Image (tube, coloured by chain):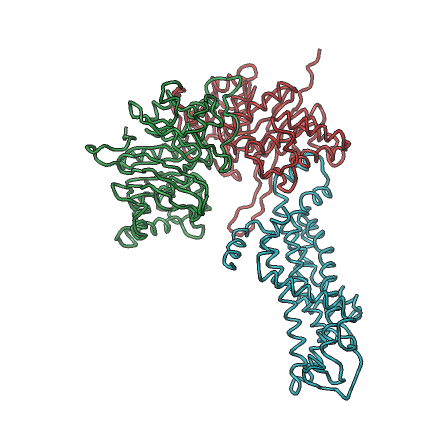
Amino acid sequence: MSGLAPASASSPPPLLSVRNLSIAVEGAGGQTVVDRVSFDLGEGGVLGIVGESGCGKSVTAMSVLRLNNPALRLRGGEILLAGEDLLRASEARIRAVRGGEVGMIFQEPMTSLNPVLAVGDQIVEAILAHRPIGARAAREAAIELLGLVGIPLPARRVASYPHQLSGGMRQRVMIAMALSCRPRLLIADEPTTALDVTIQAQIIDLLRRLQRELGMAVMIITHDLGLIADFAADVVVMYAGKVVERGATRDLFRQPLHPYTERLLASIPPLDRDVDRLTTIPGTVPSARTMPSGCRFSTRCPLAEARCRETEPPLRTMPGGRAVACHLVAEGRAA
Amino acid sequence: MVVSRLRPILEDKGAMAGLGVILLFCLMALLAPWIAPHDPTTQNVRDAFQGPGARYWFGTDEFGRDVFSRVIHGARPALMIGVFSVVLSVVLGMPLGMLAGFVGGRFDTAVSAVVDVMMSFPSLLLALMVVTLLGSAPSMVVLAIGISHVPVFVRLARSSTLVVRELDFVAASRSFGARTGHILRRHVMPNVIGPTIVMATLGIAGAIREEAGLSFLGLGIQPPAPSWGNLIRDGVNAILHAPTLALLPGLVLTASVLAFNIVGDSVRDMLDPHDIAAAAAKRDRAR
Amino acid sequence: MSVPAPLLEVHELRVHFALRATSPWQRSGTVRAVDGVSFTVAHGETLGLVGESGCGKTTVSRAVMRLLAPTAGRILLEGEDVGRLRGRALARLRPRFQMVFQDPASSLNPRMTVAELLAEPMQIAGRDAAQIAARIVHLLRVVGLDPEHARRYPHEFSGGQKQRIGIARALALEPRLLVCDEPVSALDVSVQAQIINLLKDIQAETGIGCLFVAHDLRVVRQISHRVAVMYLGEIVEQAPKAALYGAPRHPYTRALLSAVPQTREEGGGERILLGGELPNPLDPPSGCRFRTRCPIVRPECAANKPPLREIAPGHLVACHFAT
């Protein structure tokens, strides 16, 4: 376990610590898309951030490298990378972090790669931006990286253009680029959503191998709960911009505490048996206009009481390191 | 709903100014006989080549005709030909382009080939050929300019149709058993009409310019009837000793073309959802 | 007593696309997107058609819907060959088979209100206005929407609600066959479950037959009675779902199932990681098309194409070594 609860004074600081991050749409009365989100990721750990579309998981991930749409404004909080606040770092410093200490891969590798440059040249460019080595050495390093991410015949593939590669191969190239400076943290934002299931399995297998071999921490953002169960040691569940539950993946999947997590897990169609009716979550995620003042899930929660609609439950840490934001769970009355 | 869609244009000062100028020219054309201080064709040789002044605001030409009155009356052929020729191009070009884009195959290849050939010709030259063949009655000038602009609208409608054709709501309509005509009317045309309106507004500016060009060359509106083109031509003949004769009608022509262009751009911002952000930014800057 | 004709019978369907090179370094040739596919769908039954992108499953659905013309083979709907019909004769049969599309954002014309969207198929079929108005109210209730919603535009709805509108429209003509092309893949998991339950309810109520095309093996299991797995334009395995998920016989089906990320409680068996990627459809492998990625490949796989043979009642497999 990489330790999800905020670090105490005695333990070493975590690699990445997101504390009370709040982000809102620009302008007075702009919708809050991320609301006081906190979590830690230890050196070499794997953390999953999971939630449905619009829950704020991608915005949270993009904030680490300050890559969010300029219409989104930071409202508060800090993001500490080994103790250094990235949200307040200089532009030059954040550029050094991007592709240096922190690598990132995205959902659609085709739009993240320049179509008119050979993939090798793009990796060389990424290497030269951060490492003081010559062009020839950078090219050798690029070929080595392509081999590392499992691209056959890397010495030949280095001259290929993005459109000549399949989706899976392009994602491998993106991973090679992200790894070019041996980052301590890799952020993977829906890395396999655009890929077929057999290719997805290959990519996750690759990420797992790289994480182990290079001792690199991975933060994976996905809507796919199966992927989280399969890959992440710890998980943060988000709903409508807030963390509703976080903990060790194994415990959380075995015994989800928050009613949202529980229902979300139950609505996954099982692969190993037939069910007559799938569990659903009635209604839809509230919009900015219909956002309730209390618990944000209260509009869809089967257990909601009057109090849930009035006061917002804080994220409470339970024994064993699990944290849950639910009035009823706190009193031991739910799940 | 309508007001909210119109808001960008209402708050765009440039577009409002352009609309004002267009309105002014429309009134001028409509009310020309009543507001013109003199008869545009009455010759008064004793007053030839008067400079601009209190009696003749824009001065007089070689026959002593009042240039200001001639400019006011010249708005009539300019606007009429501008509007009617573009209506003709749209009526011919849009359905043809939609059909070519939707049906594809040999029909599309044939239409596109003709359009390409026509586009490779300067449109003024094309209009010149038509007028030379058919004569220069105002209706023939409309025909000439209208036909020369058809390819623009064919291309525009065709390219929009190629995009819409691939959308699933077209496939859905086909799966209900809809015929091509129904799909074109119901699903394709509403998506083609927006860009076409933009192009048409810009096209009016082009047509006014071309009418002036044809008249300048003596192939448009025939003297003594005034048109901005033949006013400028007559003025150019005397440009050395009475420069205002060409200059003032030229400025009026420029103002009208500019007005249609500005309004056309603004309509594009209004109709193109991708540019809504750009339009909002433009509005903010204007404040 | 003769067996009644199935609702849909697809026999040796082929859809080939001629690919013309647009530049000198491109290859031209024929893509055999669907190459000899046969299956049936009975009244009241759902056949799941699964496979990865490029396997031809969407092409099959579009051919069945006659949104594209089959190159060869027969598509029999209640015995009538819709694969060969054109024009008015085809339009007359259209009400019997309707489609739910993948992306409701693209399949619903954004300029039409819900009422106009639902009315369109009925207007084309020549229903009268009073009948149409009544049916719109009924359809909205069936898919769990408020009849008040009829005046709104698609962009005012969430993704799940849009797909409900898409389903209502597909049901407008009371079809006997519903072709669903990835109807839930654009939706979040909790909404996905709502739509699957809705489709099952509709089937239970109307006895509609369904061809359900999807890549998500979890979704397909929960909605289908039988499942066919496609690879590179061919069906490699077809079976009742219990057999297909419980005892898959084709190595591709096994790999596909093992690649689905498992939640902890499912545990999951051993993982079969397939190497490589889908071969170029312009130049498919000789013999068995799966042999280039098959974990149990043997030399004879390159020489002989395995036929789709029945190894148990209703269980068909195209592999030399399946027993």
Any idea which chain is the red one in this picture? C
The reply to whether residue A305 is visible in this rendering is yes
Any idea which chain is the green one in this picture? A
Residue C234 is situated, as x and y percent measured from the top left of the image, at 55, 29
The reply to whether residue C269 is visible in this rendering is no
Any idea which chain is the cyan one in this picture? B
Which of the 4 image quadrants contains residue C225? top right
Which of the 4 image quadrants contains residue A42? top left
The extreme top residue here reads C1
The extreme left residue here reads A10
Residue B196 is situated, as x and y percent measured from the top left of the image, at 66, 54
- Residue at 66% across / 67% down in the picture? B256
- Residue at 35% across / 35% down in the picture? A206
- Give the side of residue A136 with respect to residue C128, left or right: left
Residue A297 is situated, as x and y percent measured from the top left of the image, at 45, 28
Q: Is residue B110 above or below residue A246?
A: below
Q: Is residue B91 above or below residue C260?
A: below
Which of the 4 image quadrants contains residue C134? top right
- Give the side of residue C99 with respect to residue A7, left or right: right
Quadrant for the N terminus of chain C in the image: top right
Q: Is residue C208 above or below residue A161?
A: above
- Residue at 73% across / 58% down in the picture? B87
The tally of labels here is 0
Residue C229 is situated, as x and y percent measured from the top left of the image, at 53, 26
Residue nearer the viewer, A90 or A49: A90
